[in-house]
Amino acid sequence: MNSGVVSSKPKKVLDGVYQLKLPLPSSELVYLLSYLVEGRDGYLLVDSGWNTTESFCSLEEQLSRINVNLSDISLVLVTHLHPDHYGLADRIRKESGSKVLMHQKTEEILKHFKNIKNYFDKMMEWLKINGSPAGELEDWIKASIHLARLFKPARADIFLQDGEIINLGDFQFDVIWVPGHSPDHICLYESSRKILLSGDHILPTITPNVSLQIEDFGNPLKDYLESLKKLCNLKVKKVLPAHEYIFENLEKRISEIEEHHKKRLEEVLNTINTPKTAYQIAQEVTWTTGPWNKLQKWEQRAAIYEALAHLVFLKYEGRILEIKQNQTIFFQKISRNSH
């Protein structure tokens, strides 16, 4: 790990708001951008980084550079239930006495993780019926067992609702529920400063993964595109994301992401010249990280889940059919002549 990342300096975004860079293990993203906001009764930390000693030490070191102690943190807000965002929340709570805040949807998601093995079994079954060969599933099962050990989310002390206001004194944050990348994702909007803490929902150059990991999670791409529209009319000068860098022109970025998914949907649709499984379709789609045969195993798995999100969207739009044969799901394009 690059030691330069560990000793990052906190960046002052504006009076009362700092950006912290917390290192991520084995990730191309390198670090998570966490935000520290000064409140009337202590600090709010938005997203806590991965649950590693390195990340925790980096957090403590960066806090010390601005004369803040861990005990000064009174609230830890988790934008969504992914390990790089909730990882240290429980440890910070234990050491500072802070309260952990999450959207109320996390309670529903956590039910899936009461039995981690059962959840991963569901994921593997979903891959199997969508065409993944048995041999590859064995490799993925081994990888997921390792991942399951890392997946121990903190439970929330306070559940947030869409439209709720977090009053920190000088800062008043509107909670905006934006499902899609994760069913529980929230953004924070401060109207007087015109800043949006966007988590992973909107990033400056990357499009966040929108995937369907188990059948129970509905139509995540539809949720995501509708969530983007919720933010279109906000007056925002600066977007503070959880990865990459702070950026401006929110409306332009939303348009770019919408265009990306429009093209991806057409590309997915164009692969279905004959009935195919999601596994077959994922191999034909252009992924930003490279062609299918160059992707790592976990990237191939993520590609299938992302392809499924687009396929389910197309199915609900009435553009493709889902056919089940011999315990395998195939997708077939609906001919315009059939109407």
Image: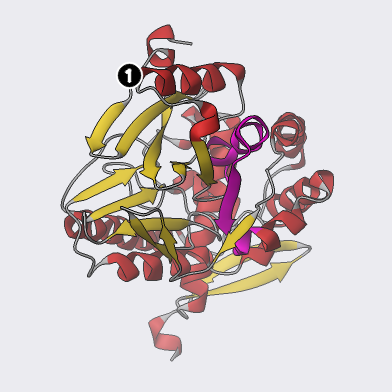
Colour pattern of the rendering: secondary structure
Q: Is residue 267 visible?
A: no
Judge left or right: residue 175 versus residue 128.
left
- Asked if one can make out residue 75 in the rendered structure from this viewpoint, the answer is yes
Would you say residue 102 sits in the magenta stretch?
A: yes
Query: Label 1 belongs to which residue?
Result: 9
Residue visible at 51% across and 64% down? 220
Image vertical order of residue 285 relative to residue 166, above or below: above
Which is nearer the eye, 64 or 280? Answer: 64
Front-lying residue, 134 or 202: 202
Residue 253 pos. (x, y %)? 22, 53
Quarter-of-image position of residue 270 = bottom left
The one nearer the camera, 324 or 149, is: 149
Identify which amino acid the numbered label 1 is placed on: Lys
- Asked if residue 96 lies in the magenta stretch, the reply is yes
In this rendering, the answer to whether 223 lies above or below 186 is: below
Q: What stretch is highlighted in magenta?
A: 82-106
Task: Tell me: 233 left or right of 336.
Answer: left
Could you tell me residue 195's position as x and y percent? 25, 52
- Pick the residue in front: 314 or 83: 83
Query: Quarter-wise, where is residue 326 in the image?
Result: bottom right
Q: In this view, does 147 lie to the left or right of 63?
A: right
Q: How many labels does the image show?
A: 1
Q: Residue furthest bottom?
A: 339
- Where residue 157 appears, x then y in whole percent? 66, 53
Instruction: Give the secondary structure at mark 1.
Output: loop
Above or below, 163 against 304 in this view is below
Q: Which residue is drawn at 43% across and 91% down?
A: 339
